[in-house]
Structures are given as structure tokens and as C-alpha cells.
Amino acid sequence: MNRRVEVTYVVRCPAAEIDSRATALAIEQSVEMPLSAIADSAVLEEIVGRVERIAPAGDGCFGVTIGLADATIGTDAGQLLSMLFGNSSLHDDVVLSDVDVPAATAAAFGGPHHGIAGFRERLSAHGRALTATALKPQGLTSTALAALAEKFAAGGIDLIKDDHGIADQSAAPFAERVPRIADAVQAAGARSGHTTLYVPNLSGDLDRMRTQVACARAAGVRAVMVAPMVAGFATIHTLVAECPDILFVAHPALGGASRIAPPLLFGKLFRLIGADAVVYPSYGGRFGYTIETCRALAAAARTPWHDLAPSLPVPAGGMTRERVPELLDVYGADTMLLIGGALLDAKENLVAATADLVAAVHRHDYMR
Amino acid sequence: MNRRVEVTYVVRCPAAEIDSRATALAIEQSVEMPLSAIADSAVLEEIVGRVERIAPAGDGCFGVTIGLADATIGTDAGQLLSMLFGNSSLHDDVVLSDVDVPAATAAAFGGPHHGIAGFRERLSAHGRALTATALKPQGLTSTALAALAEKFAAGGIDLIKDDHGIADQSAAPFAERVPRIADAVQAAGARSGHTTLYVPNLSGDLDRMRTQVACARAAGVRAVMVAPMVAGFATIHTLVAECPDILFVAHPALGGASRIAPPLLFGKLFRLIGADAVVYPSYGGRFGYTIETCRALAAAARTPWHDLAPSLPVPAGGMTRERVPELLDVYGADTMLLIGGALLDAKENLVAATADLVAAVHRHDYMR
């Protein structure tokens, strides 16, 4: 049976033109040709995108909902993105705003293997928010990064990820860096009794990523970070399917600020292809996302959606210790706060600064 | 030796803030942390991005040129994109405008194996522009698409590509469609003596694409289409390296209209990772690119750049037979005109309409 994926775009357009613009959008995202040149009635009825709804969206814009045949997408995550926004991304006045998929499409893509519950279980952390930090800067040696990681772990942090700029450079090659950091984190955990997850950043093509996952596994690591917009949705979706033992943290690199609505891209689409956690630039930091966008993003990641496990929202990008109460009031306990640079600025007091952050998160009162 | 990749951004920013904004950009695209927290002098000197130039760019904007250490990029095409624009893409007031790479970086990425000369040689087409069309709509069977392709070939077209929405759907699975269309095109060529290249669209992850290339090769096909922004730069760069016998046509899907300047993305970056031809939405069609953007894009694809072969510009997106003289006056002979929907609208006169387009391109006087 042919089901429709409902895709909502926000289009800036004079009211007098919105009907024809919506039709053009439905054609662009499906058959890409004049309907007059299509003789096949099955294509006209089942494949051509269908304008389902048009509604004013304020500020000279309209929300246009198009029904796309799920047969045109199948189960290829790259094709999903291409059908949702491939050509229309080239129009500067169109934003990809929201997507509803049939239950069968959600089931076919599969979503996260672990999601929020997976992090809580691995970390034995329940009823509280989680804490994370980043190893940086790129350019440090594996040994220097491992020394940093050991301090973060000694401070009791839940998760330590590579900075997204740390790939497989000669300063700290993946195959050298990951076992060294994993050992340092495990050693610190053995002393403190606290579990810390180390999350190395994958890079390169699918084969390179497979090799990196194998290297991480051999070092006892069971979580990795990927940037789906850089690597390609199909690459990540395949990797997730092949690695049911691995937690996937998705980084927003190359995700843009507005052409694809951040709640949709990071909260829904990253979740659909299997991100157990989604890092995003929170309001009030170095990036310009509003608090409304961030609330909607976190809600999209966590809200019940077919049978997909919820993804863990990871606000980041210039967060500080001082903002912990405010951030947790806004985001709630099913959140992982990622504080990188602000902790590193503590330098020789890094362990204490980390422990102070961790304590602030642990003692936060969600009922106040 | 540490060389710098020079990256130019256009930033919308008050004049009083541009210095600090430029510094922040240099940090964001390299070490992503407060410089005060970096103790390692080699990182400070060699890895931290360096503000090279700031110049007014009109309209309340500034051009900011940052020198990024080539060591942070290496030869990973995904990492290239991540370092150029990973985090800054999340700022809505920053455009990635231009990139200059050292000769060693250009040589390491390699560029097109064939480029413009490769198309001319395969097609025995010299001193004139080339012609292309697209098989559509998605939803047609392999047999119906092959029948269309045979007519286009009978009309003397140089290149026939799958529509970018045609992937591996059940209506026309790749493994069935590609040999069938290739046979139809070869049969038409045997009758007419004219060579037509069939260019199937690849989809999925790297493994799927490898399988598809092998399938295409077995059918005598030596050119394929890919969408680098969908598949991921690293996927395409690897595939190009593995397939020196194949011509790669890059499709702009998911390329956006403005956040990465189209001349840079399609003209330079797609070329750098190996696109022999670059399809882009031309001015005057269904998309909003200006004539200046399109001229700059075609120039970037063709201009001498280190030792990289030039890529063939393929203006598309609502082109028509009537505009051939104008388009060729603007773009010149080292161009492939892609006219899809407008030809298909000729329906039962498709062969004649194709022949008419081909004749118009062949007889164009570039000296007039």
C-alpha cells in the first residue's frame, strides 16, 4: 500500500501565489517535471507529491504540507533527505519545517537502539541529568588528551567526548588515541568507582568508520560520536544498523541554523536514523538558537513517536557551571549537559571544577 | 610543514564588533575553546585558526579570511567540510564564501580524473557545447524509462542521466533498470552512429554505491551521478578514488542556496573531491540563482586551479530549447546544457524535439 510521508515547508510567498507555489513544491520534491508530460496514471495518482494543507504561518509566510509517497523514499536514509529537501534546499525562501512519517516508515528506519534509557543503564544514573564534556583542543597528542580525560573522569563526569574537530590527524591518530584515552578513563573509574563513558569521534567514509568502531570496541569503548550531515545520513544509518552494541551521539556539524528547522533535523531526523543522543547549540551560548527552538528540539527528541526510543538531548556550545540550575529548569532531568571549554579554563583545578559541575547537576531540585 | 588553508566567510556584523567576531570564528573553526585554557604553545602557534584579513563586503557585512592549519584537515573530505563550516554553519549570519588551498592539499584531494576533456573524448565532441537530459518521472518502470532513453538517444543527445529522485525504488530497481536503459541507449547508438552516455544515479551508502558502480560497469556504463551533500563528501571522494574509469556527475541536492556560496560549493569543492561535471540550477529557470552566481560558478569549475582538471558546468533546472542561444552566449562551449522536463513535454514528438535541441546547440555561433 502506498502511504504518504507528510512534509511541512514554510514558504515566504505572496498570498496570491501560494497555491501555485505549493503545487510547484509538491512537483519539485517528487517527479520534477510538468504534469502535462506524464501519461502514466499510476504515477499521477500515487507518485506525484500532493498538497495536503496550506496555512498562514505569519510574517509573510505559509506552512505548506505535502504528501510524498513513501515508495519514493523506501528505507534509504540518504534518499529520505533527498526527497524531503534535495532540490527545494536550493530555493532560498523555503524552510523544511516538519515531517510526519507513517508507522511503517518509522519502523523501517528503526531509530535509536538505546536512547535515553541506554545512557542511564550504562551509567547507573537515574532520576538526574547527565554530565558531559569534550576533549580539546585538536593538535594535542594522544597522551595529553588522555591526561585531560583522566582528570575529567576523576571529577566524576558521566561522558567525555572528543571535540568534533578531532578526527584522525597525525597529532593524535584514532588508533593510538582511543585505546590510550579509554585506558585512562577506565583507570580513573577503577579508583573512584564511578563509570565514565568515553566517546571518540568517527570520521571518514563508511569503511574508515567501521575500522574505527572496531578499534574502539577493542579498547572497551561502546559509544561513538558522528556528524550525520557531514558523513551522510545513509552512512550513519548503516553504521547504526551494524552496531547494535554501540551508543551513537550525533553532532550537529554542518546542520545549519534555519534552512532545516533544528527541532526537525536534530530532534526528529537524527533520531529516526538512530542517534541515541543529539548534541545541539543551546540558547544563551555561542550560537543563536532561541530558547523556544531549543525547547522544541529537546521535546522532539524525547516525545513518544511511533515505537522509536527517545534520543537524549545534549545542549552545548558555550554552557557554563553557573547556568546549571537554569538549564536544568528548562530542560529537565532527561538531559545531558555538555560543558567543555568553560571547564578546561579551570586548568590546574580541572578535577575540582568538574566535581563541582557534577555536584551541581546531581543536587538539582527538579520540583522547586 | 604546516600550511594554511585560507577560508573566507562573509559575516553580517556591526563594524565595532567585527574584530572580535573574526577571532571567535577563527577559534570556532579550529580549537573551539578559550585560548586562555590552551597551554601548549605549538597548538597556539600552529593549530589555532588565524585571522588573515578583514574587509568590508557591503550591505553591513565583512569578508573575514581565516587561515586554518592544513594538518587539521588532512586528506579526509568530510573533515574538510567540517573544518570549513561544521560549527559556523550553525550561525545564521555567516556565509562560507571562498576557499584557497595549498597546492599540496589540492594534489592530495586530487580533483576530477577526467573533467571536461573526458566528456569530449568519450563523446568525440569538440568545439561545441554538450547536451544532456534526464529520465523521469520516478515511478515509471525500467522498461518505460528505457523506452524514453532510446528516444532521447535517437534524437542525438550526448548524455542521459537518471532524475536525481530515481534511486533504487521497487518501480525500477537499479540492478534491473541500468542494464535495460544501457542496452536501449547502445541500440539507438548502433543505429545512428552517435554516442550517448547513460548516467545512472547512485544512492545509499558506500557499499551500495560500489555495488551499483559494478552493476553499471557490467552493463557497459562508465559514468554515474552522485549527490555529494546527501551522500557525504568522504563517501564520494573514496568512490572517485576507487573508480578511475568512471566519469562522475555531481548533483546539487541539499546544497542550499546561500549558506555556502554556490560557486564555492559546486564550482570548487565538488571539483576538489573529483566531480567531472557539476549540475546546478541556472539563472532564469525554476530556481533563484542570479546570472552573476551562475557565471562565477561556471568560472570556478573551469578556471586553472593548481593541477586539478576542470569540471564541466551543467546548467539545469527549467532550461528550454528557446534559450539555447542565450545560455551558450553566457556559458560558452565548455558547457553541457541539461534540458529535461521541457523535452519530455514534447511527448510523441520527443525524438524530433531532442534532435531540434541538439541541432541548435551544434550550430551555435560562439563568435557572433
Image (spheres, coloured by chain):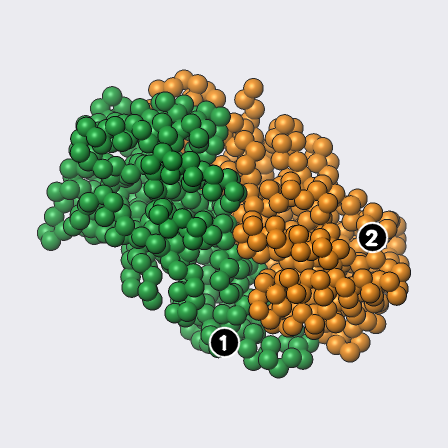
Chain colours: A orange, B green
Q: Tell me the chain of label 1.
A: B
B152 relative to A144, above or below: above
Q: Which residue is at a point 34% across and 54% down the rendered structure image?
A: B113
Q: Position of residue B107 (x, y in %)?
A: 39, 65
Q: Which residue is at a point 23% across and 52% down the rendered structure image?
A: B334
The quarter of the picture where residue A27 lies is top left
For marks 2 and 1, give the one nearer the viewer.
Answer: 1
Q: Residue furthest left?
A: B368
Q: Nearer the viewer, residue A318 or A14?
A: A318
Distance of label 2 from label 1 (alpha carbons): 41 Å
B277 relative to B31, above or below: above
Q: Nearer the viewer, residue B230 or B122?
A: B122
Name the secondary structure under disc 1.
loop
Q: Position of residue A157 (x, y in %)?
A: 80, 62
Residue B33 is at least partly visible in this image: no
Residue A101 is at least partly visible in this image: yes
The numbered dot on residue A123 is 2
Q: Which residue is at a point 60% across and 77% down the rendered structure image?
A: B43
Name the secondary structure under disc 2.
helix
Kind of residue at disc 2:
Leu
Kind of residue at disc 1:
Asn
The numbered dot on residue B2 is 1
